[in-house]
Amino acid sequence: MPLSGRVVPLAAFLGWLLLSLTAPATLPAASTVSGEAYGVDLTAPSATLTRFPEVVLAPEGGAASASVQSVNVPAILQTGAIAVATEGMTSPTGASAESSATVQQLNVLTGLVTADGVTARSSSTCDGTSASSSAAGTTFTNLVVAGVPVGATPPPNTVIGVPGGTVTLNEQIPSGNGMDTSALTVNAIHVQVTTLLLGTIDLVVASAHSDVDCDVPVGPTPTPTPTSGACDPNPTPSPTPTAGAPIVSGEAFDVFVDVPPVQLAKNPRVVLAPQGGSLAASVVGVDLPGTITTGTLTVNTNGATGPTSAASDATAQVEQLDVLGGLVTADLVRSMSSSACDGTTAASNDAGTSFVDLVVDGTPIAGTPPPNTVIVVPGVATVTLNEQTGGGDGIDTSELTVTAVHVVLENGAGEIVVASAHSDVDCAPLPAPVATSTAPVPTCTPVPTASPTPTATPTVLPSPIPTAVPTVARDLTGTAAGTGPRSP
């Protein structure tokens, strides 16, 4: 059928069809958000407290919040109540997110920084045309730094020099293009100091982050086409790695909660470096009504390495425990894990693990339950007591994780972990493998060397008698049979 009264040439049609098949499809876009808030984050030689308490927003939005009664890290940090929250929402062309963190009765490094209360707040929004973020709502109450009162809310990124380092107030870290994306992190207080007795300390108090993206492609991620590379038909084999010096690892944390909408990361938590050392932290208590309440929480881990030996241990202890409104209670639970290797043998043990006045679903449990004692509470949860997971070859390596109480709710509704201690040693570690590209390696087919073509010896023939070449007359005015003139 003619198109607009014209005949489409075959070559043009095939060109259009090829472009239609190979042109990339335009993918629709969706909106996403992210948000995070935490009360304190501490890194110091004597203690590590990782983003405690912390809430994280899902990409599609929602809401999350958490709170604790107080935090106490002797000589470094004391607080009153801490509350954190994040929320967000998305639509086909818009998104918004907001996070906040409030810390009350703050005292850092025995009076270096004090405040009745600090709040960090971050909000971000986008509508498909523009995107922006704001720190509105960030406040400080009776803030004092190095004995000097700081009035009202300091300007963004106010840096105050103190003995051994700096204190940054109202620290703000923005990003985004202002059209489709925008993000802002607000840290109310960031302390970075080095002291003679406590070493180097990095402490963030009250952190809030929000982030929006109104231009997220929807669809499969294209797989990059591998490009050809150098071809070596006889590659040099990689050298066999040799064992290194002994290393250790250790970790201890007291509470982990994942019972939506209530979430609490591993805290307080300490993690041992591969070369060893000693770390400890404590918290006055956790109060998540209906989920978990505790008294004092303490954790520590220690380790040492030698030319042919290594040892590590970890302890997690929780006092006055109450899980899920009385499902599990105890005056005290303590997990301990120890591991050692000497170049010939390696072993781990749980010596020191103990329970005091433990009650599960109304039933008292005397002494320390055997490893991996499982109690099923029909319709509610499965409770594992003195949960132990080991590993290693018993010659060079050994590890053990001991968890005092592990509650898994029915139907995948969540879990709660209480008092977990891990120790690990390796007396013959192999070096980390060199990272290699994940792109396909081009197939290498060696090209054989061509044999030279033999040269023929020409045969001399008598020259032929030349003949006349007939002249062919061509009709330049006619057209090929079956065709007519092309339409203009």
Image (cartoon, rainbow, N blue to C red):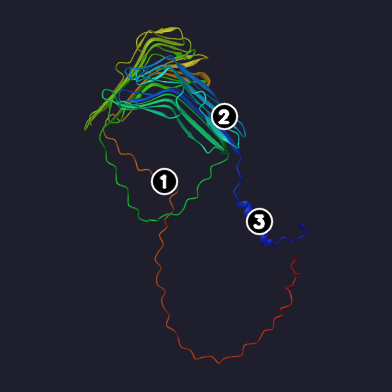
Q: Position of residue 471 (x, y in %)?
A: 66, 86
Q: Residues within 10 Å of mark 1 (few under 14, many from 20)?
A: few
Q: Residues within 10 Å of mark 3 (few under 14, many from 20)?
A: few
Judged left or right of residue 309, residue 166 is: right
Q: Which mark is residue 437?
A: 1
Q: Find out whether the residues at labels 1 and 3 contact each other: C-beta distance under 8 Å.
A: no
Position of 470 relative to 304 (above/below)? below
Camera sees residue 87: yes
User: Which residue position holds label 3?
Assistant: 16
- Find the distance from the CA under tag 1 to the CA under tag 3: 38 Å
- Closer to the camera in the image, 5 or 141: 141
Residue found at the far bottom of this picture: 465
Camera sees residue 339: no
In primary-sequence order, the first of circles 1 and 3 is: 3
- Image quarter where the N terminus lies is bottom right
- Closer to the camera in the image, 50 or 430: 50
Position of 297 relative to 131 (above/below)? above
Query: Which quadrant of the figure has residue 162?
Result: top left
- Residue sitting at x 43%, y 50%: 441
Q: Position of residue 105 (x, y in %)?
A: 41, 15
Position of 116 relative to 230 (above/below)? above
Q: Position of residue 114 (x, y in %)?
A: 38, 18
Hey, what amino acid is under mark 2?
A: Ser
- Find the distance from the CA under tag 2 to the CA under tag 3: 43 Å
User: Which residue position holds label 2?
Assistant: 96
Q: Find out whether the residues at labels 2 and 3 contact each other: C-beta distance under 8 Å.
A: no
Hey, what amino acid is under mark 3?
A: Trp
- Residue sitting at x 35%, y 53%: 235
Helix, strand or loop at mark 3: helix
Hey, what amino acid is under mark 1?
A: Ser
Query: Which quadrant of the figure has residue 40?
Result: top left
